C-alpha cells in the first residue's frame, strides 16, 4: 500500500505545534528529525531538546487529497508562513526506513539511550535501545514519550512486571525491560504497533520477556507498573480498568496529556491512586500514581 509523505522544514519552537496540526489533519504517523546534522547530548533536567532546524514528517493514506491537505495546513497555521515542504509517494518499506536517515541517538535521564539500528550506540556501556518504529508512533522525540523514559531511568523497574498500554513502537516496554523488568505486556489496538513492537523486541533480544496483544485479548493480570502514553479521552475511560490491573502499592505513569487536562485526569484516578504531577514539558504533562492499598 502506498502512502503520501509530507515533509516540512521548520524551526524547533514551532515543530511540536506543527506535529499537532498534522495529526489533526489526519496523519497516520508523525516524526521529527534533524535538518542539519546537529548533535543532541544530555538535555538539562526537565527539558526535551529538538534540533534548531527540524524536519516534521507526516504520513497520510494514498487517497489523501494533497491540494486540500496543503490548503487546510495553511489555514491552521494562520499568520505563520507555510514552511518549506516536499510531497512524496512511498510504499510501506520506503516509509519504515526513510526516517532513519535523519534520526540520531538521544539520551534520556542519566543512562538510557534510544538509537536507530543504523547507528552504533554512542555509549555502549549504558542502557541502549535499538529502535525501528516502522509505521507505529514512538521514537522518543515527543515530550510525552521523553518524560516517560526519564521516569523509567529514574525508577528502574528491576524485577518488576510491567504493562505498556498503547505501546506504539514498544519504546516504553523496551526501556522497562532493558532497565530490569522481568515480564512485560505490550498492548495496543493497532496491529501495526504490535508488529513494530515484536520486531523491536527481537532486535533488542527481548522477545522472551515482552508479550504483545490487542486490548480484548489481554487476560486480566495485576502488575507492578502500568505505563500509558495515550490521550486524555482513553485515559479517562480506562481508569477503572487500570485500577484493576495495578497491584496494591503498584505504580502508574500516565502521559499524552495537555496541561489543562491534567487536573481532570487526577480527579478521575484519585479514588484508586495517590496521584500527582511528575513532570511538565511545555504544555505536556506526565502523572505518577501509587495504587492505594
Image (cartoon, helix red, strand yellow):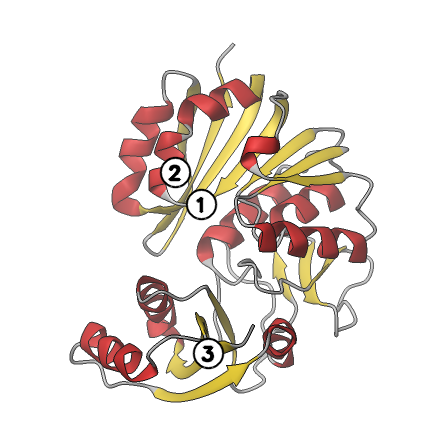
Q: Who comes first in sequence, dot 3 or dot 1?
A: 3
Residue 55 coordinates in the image, percent (x, y): 46, 80
Density class for disc 3 (Cα within 10 Å; few <14, some 14-19, many ≥20) is: many
Residue 25: x and y, percent? 31, 67
Q: Contact, CB < 8 Å: mark 2 with mark 3?
A: no
Q: Which mark is residue 230?
A: 1
Which residue extends farthest left? 79
Question: Could you say which disc has been placed on residue 4 in the image?
Answer: 3
Work out whether residue 52 can be spotted. no
Residue nearest the viewer, comparing 86 with 157: 86
Residue underneath mark 2: 234
Q: Residue at x 40, y 82 (%)?
A: 8
Query: In the image, 62: left or right of 202?
Result: left
Q: Quadrant of the N terminus?
A: bottom right
Q: CA distance from mark 2 to mark 3?
A: 28 Å
Dot 1, crowdedness within 10 Å: few (<14), some or many (≥20)?
A: some
Amino acid at each position: 500500500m502506498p502512502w503520501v509523505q509530507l515533509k516540512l522544514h521548520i524551526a524547533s519552537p514551532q515543530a511540536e505545534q506543527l506535529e499537532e496540526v498534522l495529526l489533526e489533519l489526519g496523519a497516520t504517523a508523525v516524526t521529527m528529525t534533524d535538518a542539519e546534522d546537529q548533535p543532541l547530548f544530555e538535555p538539562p533536567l526537565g527539558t526535551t531538546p529538538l534540533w534548531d532546524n527540524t524536519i516534521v514528517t507526516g504520513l497520510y493514506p494514498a487517497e489523501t487529497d494533497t491540494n486540500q491537505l496543503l490548503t487546510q495546513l495553511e489555514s491552521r497555521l494562520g499568520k505563520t508562513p507555510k514552511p518549506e515542504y516536499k510531497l512524496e509517494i512511498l510504499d510501506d518499506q520506503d516509509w519504515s526506513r526513510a526516517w532513519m536517515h535523519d534520526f540520531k541517538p538521544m539520551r534520556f535521564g542519566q543512562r538510557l539511550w534510544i538509537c536507530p539500528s543504523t547507528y552504533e550506540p554512542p555509549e555502549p556501556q549504558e542502557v541502549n535501545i535499538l529502535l525501528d518504529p516502522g509505521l507505529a508512533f514512538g521514537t522518543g522525540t515527543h515530550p510525552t514519550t521523553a518524560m516517560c523514559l526519564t521516569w523509567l531511568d529514574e525508577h528502574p523497574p528491576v524485577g518488576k512486571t510491567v504493562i505498556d498500554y498503547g505501546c506504539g513502537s514498544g519504546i516504553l516496554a523496551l526501556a522497562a525491560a532493558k532497565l530490569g523488568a522481568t515480564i512485560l505486556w505490550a498492548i495496543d489496538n493497532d496491529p501495526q504497533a504490535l508488529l513494530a513492537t515484536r520486531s523491536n523486541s527481537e532486535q533488542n533480544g527481548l522477545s522472551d520477556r515482552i508479550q504483545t496483544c490487542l486490548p480484548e485479548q489481554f487476560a486480566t493480570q495485576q502488575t507492578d507498573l502500568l505505563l500509558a502514553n495515550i490521550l486524555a479521552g482513553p485515559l479517562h475511560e480506562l481508569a477503572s480498568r487500570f485500577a484493576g490491573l495495578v497491584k496494591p502499592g503498584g505504580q502508574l505513569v500516565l502521559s499524552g496529556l495537555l496541561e489543562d487536562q491534567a487536573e481532570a485526569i487526577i480527579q478521575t484516578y484519585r479514588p484508586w491512586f495517590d496521584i500527582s504531577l511528575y513532570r511538565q514539558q511545555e504544555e505536556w504533562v506526565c502523572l505518577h500514581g501509587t495504587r492505594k492499598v
